[in-house]
Amino acid sequence: MKVLIVDDEPAVRLSLSRAFSMKGHEVILAEDGLKGLEAWQSKDPDLVVLDVLMPGLSGPALLQEIGEKKRAKVLLMSAYSGDYDLEKVKAMGADDFISKPFADIFSV
């Protein structure tokens, strides 16, 4: 599976990249929304792990830009979890939400 991780925090990108790589997935990294949009369009990932607040293009704005072309599952994440619930993120085009900092989501 191809996984695109779009987050402006290097530590988050690195830790998620390691976790997905250890499970055998191909990982694509982008450090902001604009580079994430470019990678999404050119690499056609199966899963996108997308930060909400980023320079250049926010996660929700990136989802809006992709629009109907979205084929990947999208996991939206934010440190501001009080501002989001599953209904709200689904209305934005995401499939699920996780708040940061997060526990080991790969132990399952």
Image (cartoon, rainbow, N blue to C red):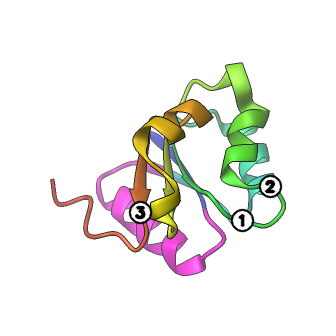
Disc 1 versus disc 2: distance between alpha carbons? 6 Å
Image location of residue 54, percent across then percent down: 71, 65
Camera-side residue of 87 and 68? 87
Camera-side residue of 84 and 64? 84
Q: Residue at x 15, y 53 (%)?
A: 108
Residue designated by label 2:
57
Q: Residue reaching furthest top?
A: 68
Q: In the rendered structure, find residue 99 and report the number of the disc placed on it.
A: 3
Image location of residue 56, percent across then percent down: 84, 61
Q: Secondary structure at mark 3?
A: strand
In the picture shown, does residue 38 fall above or below 58?
above
Q: Residue at x 73, y 44 (%)?
A: 62
Residue type (three-letter) at the residue carrying disc 2:
Leu
Q: Residue reaching furthest left?
A: 108
Image location of residue 101, percent across then percent down: 40, 74
User: Sequence order check: which comes first, mark 3 or mark 1?
Assistant: 1
Magenta stretch in the rendered image = 7-26
Task: Tell me, yes or no, whether the highlighted magenta stretch contains residue 87.
Answer: no
Q: Nearer the viewer, mark 3 or mark 1?
A: 3
User: Sequence order check: which comes first, mark 2 or mark 3?
Assistant: 2
Image location of residue 39, percent across then percent down: 72, 46
Overall secondary structure of the magenta section: helix
Q: Secondary structure at mark 2?
A: loop
Q: Is residue 47 visible?
A: no
In the picture shown, does residue 8 fall above or below 60?
below
Q: Residue at x 79, y 67 (%)?
A: 55
Residue type (three-letter) at the residue carrying disc 1:
Met
Q: Disc count in the image?
A: 3
Relative to residue 106, is residue 32 drawn left or right?
A: right
Q: In the rendered structure, find residue 54 and report the number of the disc placed on it.
A: 1
Q: Secondary structure at mark 1?
A: loop
